[in-house]
Amino acid sequence: MLEHLDPVFLARVQFAFTVSFHILFPSFTIGLASWLAVLEWRWLRTGKQVYADVYKMWVKIFAVTFGMGVVSGVVLSFQFGTNWSIFSDAGGNIIGPLLGYEVLTAFFLEASFLGIMLFGWNRVSPRLHFAATVIVAAGTLVSAFWILSANSWMQTPTGFRVGEHGLLYPTDWLAVIFNPSFPYRFVHMVTAAYLTTAFTVAGIGAFYLWQKRHIAHARVMLGMAMIMAIFVAPLQLLFGDMHGLNTFAHQPAKVAAMEGLWETTRGAPLVLFGWPDQEAEITRYAVEVPKLSSLILTHSLDGEVRGLKAWPENERPPAAVVFWTFRIMVGLGLLMIATGVAAIVLYFRKRLFDARWFQYWCMALTPAGFVAVLAGWFVTEVGRQPWIVQGVLRTSDAVSPVMAQSVALSLAAFIVVYLFVFGAGTYYILHLINKGPEDGEGVYGAHGMDQPPLVTDVARKKGGRHVQS
Amino acid sequence: MFSLEGFLDLPLIWYALIATAVFLYVLLDGFDLGVGILFPFAPTDQCRDAMMNSVAPFWDGNETWLVLGGGGLLAAFPLAYAVLMPAFYIPVIVMLLGLIFRGVAFEFRFKARENTRWIWDYSFHFGSLAAAFMQGVIIGAFVQGVEVAGRSYAGGAFDWLNAYSLMTGVAVIFGYALLGATWLVMKTEDLTRQWAAKTASYTLIYQALFLAAVSISMPAINSDIRQLWFSLPNVFFLAPLPGASAVLIVLIWRGLRRGKEIGPFLMSFGLFFTGYLGIAISMWPYLVPFEITFRQAAAAPGSQSLLLVGTVVLLPVILAYVGYCYYIFRGKVSGENGYY
């Protein structure tokens, strides 16, 4: 059976599987690291124990998630070579330095200061511990900067020339790093990570409120998450729209797949739902809003939008996957905005922390960010197909000269190991969540210090006024 | 576009930098993999807690050197990266799976209930064992040469597998065990320290045997290496290496006997250095033995220049804060020290 397998297909499935698993962890840790920094800052500023308790609970979840992110990320750094060696050879001149900078500027920073963040409580001053948290948070953002630069370059390659053996040579590094789609993709992804964290935290805060335990902690969680949802979810719609316009300018075939549009049309309708049929070259069962697609993309009611038929068949992305994952992402984004609006209304009615339906609602949306992030990546990555570097190198030409059996067996091993290991990780995270924050047993208290030193500093500056801990 | 090609021998600098990154990886992850290799043989559960605590703040940073070595190879020598990774497809994947199990064990072990903790104890052990073994297999297969056609790997899926590479796999297991044991001598107290000192002595004997076996067999299996080693003036450059190894082995042995704590660990580093240098000299100037030299595999000068600028600025900074982290967590750990 194994001899009939297609190595290109298997390599794609393997990369999709490992990268999809991996993306879940940074999506969560980017937001979580920033949030932990804010929590620690709040704690040092106010001396309120509740912030320390919440920090202590979530830093454990952060550690488990970060550990899983590291090990799944190491896999990816080698997979370029094992499965996509032709791409590594051809694109190494450009992709290599970008990934190299990610390691030099972010990975070492995160890995080193994570040690202090987790184990350094009774070894460094609170100020330095806070600095470590901030550095880890900054590291996650720097890491996102480089990896999204590399990915965006594959989507909208600029600043290079094609040389001997089909190798790609950089001609302008600024054009490579700040390629046309990079700013949009970076902002869109970081915002997505913040929202992912916000909705996870909101869901768990709502869970405690619903169970009527850890009330004070849960209010911090749900409250801070909703501030994020209120301000950032609508912004994300704006960023997403800008990103979409950028894609329309640079990757119109991807947009045609997102819209399920086959014929090049003036005044193109927005297809709300439907089923793009790649064989028949039509979108079946389409529910449309006339002219809206043209209005969004060209800001004119009868602007021209190119349909998929404008490209030869072997240059069209698989429309159904792109079409549907795009709708899942946008749909979840709209639900997030609605949640923010509901939170505002409930806040002014003083019902934010006790409306039962809202607690159910937030609990139901706990995984929303993760699903939206995955869907978004499917839109952008599947939408780029059949290219690995848009317009330059085909995915099918980039695969390693390894036997299909090797790829199939390693894929099977990855599936088994990931499900077991990351399943166990999820179990431990759920366990930590179920246990919840520990009341009053502050981070410093555990090591024989009654109060964090910095809080006493703050108290002294305020004229020796007692600060409640 | 800027390039430092006119002033600097970029491929040579990058060859040295990648070699340094890989060596730092071998040393640093070597000792924490070694701790994992020795894990189930510790006398008590408390010893195991102490062992885990001794490396928990560092393992992530240590492993980052592997990512730098791999990423650096892609950036500076993409052709070598593109040939070597498919050549070692299976050992690389098994190593990665091992590193997954080992990496998550640090977090999961302290979260698991008493009755399931053994899963993560064995994940830590077998993950470390698999990673160390596969790294040794890769080195053993590497020195025997890789088949290349055009710009791609041209061999089979199992070319890496033979008696010699299996032997080097086992050799690396014992080498890392020595690093791990001497690390534990330095970082732990009482029962754990006594046990680690005894274990270090045993692994040192095996390490000496394997070093001798590799040194004798390398020229025996490969005529290129034979010529390189025994031609003038190379013989004068190479002769000090086995001599230095022998001296270091004696010094480590004596240090362990006399209850020294830091010396044996640092001298184990030295032992790895002589071995590593021996391999590096033997492979010169190949990055894909005996097909592609580091000059042929070099990335575009513009690419090597860009990353070099960053490396020159950032590497000292990285070494400084990595050193600072080791300084913060200096001194002995105990089993009761607990997890944050």
Image (tube, coloured by chain):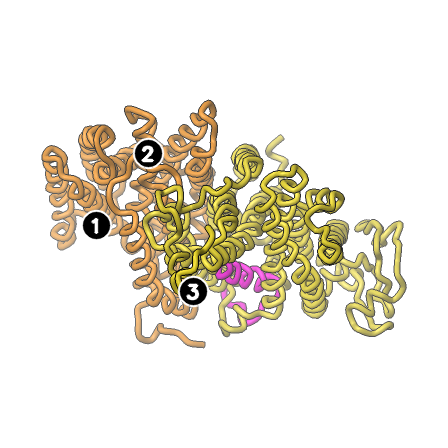
Tell me which chain the residue with mark 3 is part of. A
In the image: residue B224, left or right of residue A420: left
Which of these two is toward me, B254 or B47?
B47
* Mark 1 or mark 2, earlier in chain: 1
Give percent across and percent down for residue A215.
Answer: 61, 43
Q: Residue at x 13, y 42 (%)?
A: B248
Q: In the image, which disc is placed on residue A462?
A: 3
Letter of the chain in orange? B
Q: Quadrant of the C terminus of chain B?
A: top left
Q: Position of residue B293 (x, y in %)?
A: 34, 56
Q: Which chain is yellow?
A: A
Horizontally, is B81 left or right of A198 in the view? left
Q: Nearer the viewer, residue B153 or A306?
A: A306
The secondary element bearing badge 3 is classed as: loop
Q: Which mark is residue A374?
A: none
Mark 1 Cα shell of 10 Å, populated few (<14), some (14-19), many (≥20): some
Location of mark 2 (residue): B336
Mark closer to the observer (1, 2): 2
Mark 3 and mark 2: Cα distance apart in space = 39 Å
The type of residue carrying mark 2 is Glu
- Tag 2: Cα neighbours inside 10 Å, few (<14), some, or many (≥20)? few
Q: Which residues are magenta?
A: A141-164
Residue kind at label 1, given as amino acid type? Leu
Q: Which residue is mark 1?
A: B228
Q: Residue at 67% of width from left, 54% of height from top?
A: A376
Q: Is residue B134 left or right of residue B251?
A: right
Amino acid type, label 3: Lys
**Is residue A258 on the magenta stretch?**
no
Task: Label 1, secondary structure: give it.
Answer: helix
